Image (cartoon, rainbow, N blue to C red):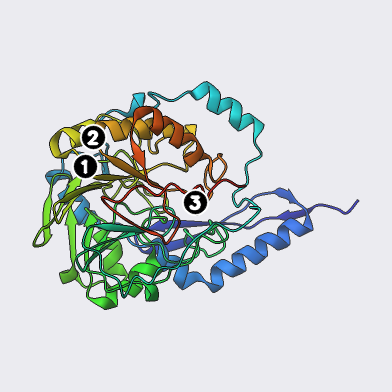
Amino acid sequence: MKPYRTSRDFIIFVHTNSTVKTISHAINMPMRKPKLILILITLAVILLSGCSTIRSIGKIPSKERRAEFAVKYPNFINNEFRNLYDASDSLIYVDTTRIRKEIKMRKFTKRPKLSQPIPSVKTNLKDITFNRPTITWFGHSSYLIQSQGFNILVDPLLTDYASPIWYFNRSMPGSYVYKIKDLPPIDVLLITHDHYDHLDCHTIRKLRKKNTHAVVPVGVGSFLKQWNWKSGHMQEVYWGDTVDLAPGIRLISTPSQHRSGRWLKKNQTLWTSYVLEIHGYRIFIGGDSGYNKHFKDIGDTYGPFDLAILENGQYNLDWAKNHSFPEQTVHTAQDLRTRMVLPVHWARFAAAYHTWNEPIKELLPLMDDAGILVTIPLIGEPYTIGDPPKTEVWWDFE
């Protein structure tokens, strides 16, 4: 048997604002040579990509701005944003016994080996105009909303990974097919919160050169400023704020139940959902959210909706306060009083204990029982509000 090696330098990267400090902590830890080599290779990759990695992490709001938040925003308490309602009952409507049993039976893998690539289509989005609001989904929670020549890009992640380092949280095969060059001119960039799978540094930096106007939650502007976004082309919003984007197009920031943070310091920026009123139609843009009473508040105030784009995927019991299970997505749709649901936050990354297509398999029969229509376009396939739902079963494989 080969002897164990000892590693005495344990590197921890601590992020505070835009600074990354390297702390060496002596530990006495038995380690086989292959593991030591792997760690050294990993550290080398991090160092070689250091500027890109540090930039991707971004910069949280300054101490002075956070002091302003405490005075201005009622849910900024003890130096962090809080959710609107107590999240202790977030597992309402969820069969937790079933989920626990299923988790025990599964072998979780971050990047499943699928029997085939995720199906997708490549639509020429530059040379097409839609008279009614049309959504083209890019997988996970990224999508383009087009209506009468006006283009809104939501939480764009047009790179192959959702993390500060390229080999973590990679897209599943077949799910990464669109890049910035494939898009028409973007009028509005819309961000729901600052997590890596919704706020991508590389995509944002490419968009900043195109005179796009950005609408982001309070505090998220700090990231865009560090990424050299023009301050005159950016607007931060708080829950209840209304933005008139163009004649016939209005945006309202509404609550979600989630969290924020890209490194160690959490909840320094706000998270939000949106109500989009566009050319006579009403769309709910859900972002990420656990289930709570805020959905009924939104439905009572702004509903009914022609379409709700709702998170349905990457859920587990540890994240129950911040993400929704399929059973809860049904009740969210009912609370919002929406005519149709487009489920997102699935089919690109694997971050939870369920199989890649479980969210849609679980959701469809529940929605059918509730009498709510669901449209499930392929990645890259436009869906126009008012058309029959997309119902092709393209996702039934593992």
- What residue sits right under mark 3 in the picture? 347
Helix or strand or loop: what does disc 3 sit on? loop
Compared to residue 54, the image places residue 209 above or below, namely below
Neighbourhood count class around disc 2 (C-alpha, 10 Å): few under 14, some 14–19, many 20 upward:
many
Between 89 and 40, the one lying in front of the other is: 89
Q: Nearer the viewer, mark 2 or mark 3?
A: 2
Residue 327 location (% of width, % of height): 41, 30
Neighbourhood count class around disc 3 (C-alpha, 10 Å): few under 14, some 14–19, many 20 upward:
many
Three-letter residue code for mark 1? Phe
Tag 2 and tag 1, C-beta contact below 8 Å:
yes
Closer to the N terminus: mark 3 or mark 1?
1
Q: CA distance from mark 2 to mark 1?
A: 6 Å
Helix or strand or loop: what does disc 1 sit on? loop
Neighbourhood count class around disc 1 (C-alpha, 10 Å): few under 14, some 14–19, many 20 upward:
many
Between 1 and 351, the one lying in front of the other is: 351
- What residue sits right under mark 1 in the picture? 305
